[in-house]
Amino acid sequence: MELIKISAVSYLNTFPFVFGIKTSGELDDIDLQLDIPSICAEKLKNNLVDLALVPVGAIPGLKDPIPISDYCIGAEREVKTVVLLSQKPLEEISEIALDFDSNTSVQLVKVLAKKFWKIAPSWRNLGPGEAEKGSSLESVVAIGDKTFRMIREFPYVYDLAGEWIRYTSLPFVFAVWLANKPLPEGFIRKFNLALEYGINRKQEIPHFFPDKIPAGFDAIHYLEHNISYPFDARKKQGMAFFLKLIAER
């Protein structure tokens, strides 16, 4: 049987998914690849994988993607790991540098700036790894585990999920599981069981990924309180509204 190729994000917020896929015993015939969010989307778009955890901002660039999971990477409060870091308050920002790693955070900060913050900064695209050297920048959007360190370098921190929720009263969805072709029903059922297995065992994450957790960071609290995994009706509503806004921009 040909392996089903899966691209997943290699950040702390996706570790329950990765843990479930690797340890639940539900999935055997797979090739799991760990990537940054933008690469997940590109691999699915170019048919290098069959299934990927895709940043929502990349969905408009995909041809007929097929949703296959009951779970997502979402937020119903501040998410902590998708932030605008700035040396100045919002109303004084003149330029925002954009993290290479995620299309969705870039789209989100532009929607917030235009629709809600009512500011018009210039935008600067960063290359791979450049956001981590962001202390020399006026303002930078940063995502993922590097934000735990970078937050200390800026006096102003704006949580992008928290800002979205404050203005829209809707949850935000960062990434969803999509396929680029129909997958067997049996596989989809087992895939969702594997994800559920990992989500229900968040307490085991620090022990399974001991070298990936920042020193002194309460990973379990973060996974329990800042990330919301069920892809429920309100998250679908929030995602649809976000996609509508980026189409209008």
Image: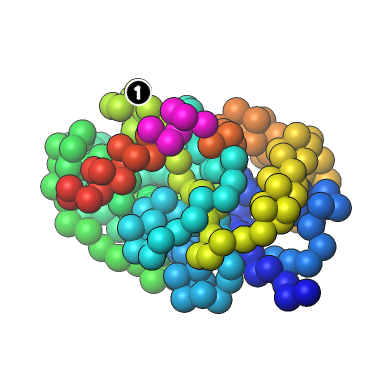
Element on which disc 1 rests? loop
Residue 119: quarter of image: top left
Q: Is residue 242 left or right of residue 93?
A: right
Q: Is residue 177 magenta?
A: no
- On-image quarter of the N terminus: bottom right
Residue 38 in sight: yes
The residue positioned 45% from the left and 41% from the top of the image is 173
Residue 39 in sight: no
Residue 158 locus on image (x, y percent): 36, 37
The residue positioned 47% from the left and 29% from the top of the image is 233
- On screen, residue 203 above or below 48: above
* Principal secondary structure, stretch drawn in magenta: helix
Residue type at mark 1 is Ser
Q: Is residue 186 left or right of residue 130?
A: right
Residue receiving disc 1: 169
Nearest to the observer: residue 176 or residue 91: 176
Residue 160 locus on image (x, y percent): 38, 39
Nearest to the observer: residue 141 or residue 166: 166
Residue 51: quarter of image: bottom right
- On screen, residue 219 above or below 49: above
